Image (cartoon, rainbow, N blue to C red):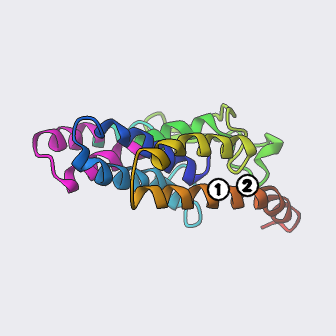
Amino acid sequence: MMATTHAAMGVCLATLVLPVAPEFAVPAALGAIAGGVFPDLDVAVVAHRRTLHFPEHYWLAVLAVLPVAVVWPAPETVAAAFFALSAAVHSVSDAFGGGLGARPWDNDDQRGVYSHHRGEWIPPRRWIPYDGSPRDLAAAATLSLPGLLLFGSPVRELTAAMVALSAVYVLVRKPLGNFAARHDL
């Protein structure tokens, strides 16, 4: 899935704060956006879906920071809790996407996300066939609705920018993947 899909998923999680502590909704959403994007920072530098993706271990961070946010609510503690929660959900949900190959629509790669706990790759389920697929854009757009409808600035603007970026990425994803495969990039 696209990082923007994960970020939008995080904003959906942050809507849980709106009815109970609306003053912390924006920090929750911003922390969730950052946490939703964070695991994908490994894409260009090191082993993607292995280095910063921890499908089991981020939940330990959630268990550590969520009680702190509940007992000592502050913008920083709430943002940290939703950062961890969004990173955890991101890492798990990558198993529902496609493999890691340059052309994941060919289904030639069986690496969904790496389980550090088990020491093996979790195979992709391909519910979202590949990052940047039309189905991924549909998921990103749907998951963006709470950010667009329930939040004000800056969450609404960030969400709108993520949807626009997602649409552009979907238009170029396959051509870029095909180019990279033809030129051994």
**Element type at mark 1:** helix
- The residue carrying pointer 2 sits among few (fewer than 14), some (14 to 19) or many (20 or more) residues within 10 Å by Cα, namely some
In this figure, which residue is indicated by the disc labeled 1? 166
Q: Quadrant of residue 10?
A: top left
- Residue sitting at x 56%, y 47%: 5
x and y percentages locating residue 107 in the rendered image = 79, 40
What segment is highlighted magenta in the picture? 62-86
Query: Residue 5 in magenta?
Result: no
Question: Could you tell me the amino acid type at mark 2?
Answer: Val
In this figure, which residue is indicated by the disc labeled 2? 170
Closer to the camera, 151 or 72? 151
Q: Quadrant of residue 122?
A: top right
* Left or right: residue 19 compared with residue 166: left
**Element type at mark 2:** helix
Query: Residue 71 in magenta?
Result: yes
* Left or right: residue 177 compared with residue 32: right
